[in-house]
Image: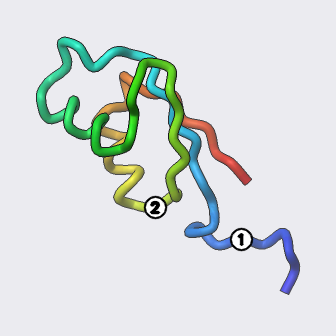
Amino acid sequence: MPENTKKAADKMLKITLVKSKIGAVPKNRKIVESMGFTKLNSSVIKPDNASTRGQIRLIAHMVKVEELN
């Protein structure tokens, strides 16, 4: 099997918090905390799966997402 073929589970996402959680809806604030963000402009690396994509969809206005290979 070629090395450059990766499954979706092998892909990772780098997610950066670019908007403060101050003043956010409480549900969105808890999502930000559960994803592991500590400060503004902090980044976390999460697997590219349905649950992570669902969380990102709810706080898309607060984060920047990059795909890692």
Image quarter of the N terminus? bottom right
Name the residue type under label 1. Lys
5 relative to 11 in the view: left or right? right
Residue farthest to the right, as pictured: 2
Give the number of the disc on residue 49. Answer: 2
Q: Amino acid at mark 2?
A: Asn
Residue at horizontal 52 percent and vertical 57 percent from the top: 48
- Give the tally of numbered discs: 2
Q: CA distance from mark 1 to mark 2?
A: 13 Å
Residue at 12% x, 29% y is 26
| Mark 1 neighbour density, 10 Å: few (under 14) some (14–19) many (20 or more) | few
* Image height of 66 relative to 41, above or below: below
- The tag earlier along the polypeptide, 1 or 2, is 1
The disc at residue 45 is none
Viewer-side residue, 36 vs 26: 36
From this view, report whether residue 13 is shown above or below residue 17: below
Residue 19 image offset from top left, x and y in percent: 39, 16
- List x then y, in percent, for residue 33: 28, 37
The answer to whether residue 46 is above or below residue 30 is below
Of residue 19 and residue 53, the one placed in the foreground of this image is 19
1 left or right, relative to 63: right
The C terminus sits in image quarter: bottom right
Q: Which residue is mark 1?
A: 6
Dot 2: what SS?
Answer: loop
Q: Secondary structure at mark 1?
A: loop
For the point 41% across and 22% down, which residue is it? 39
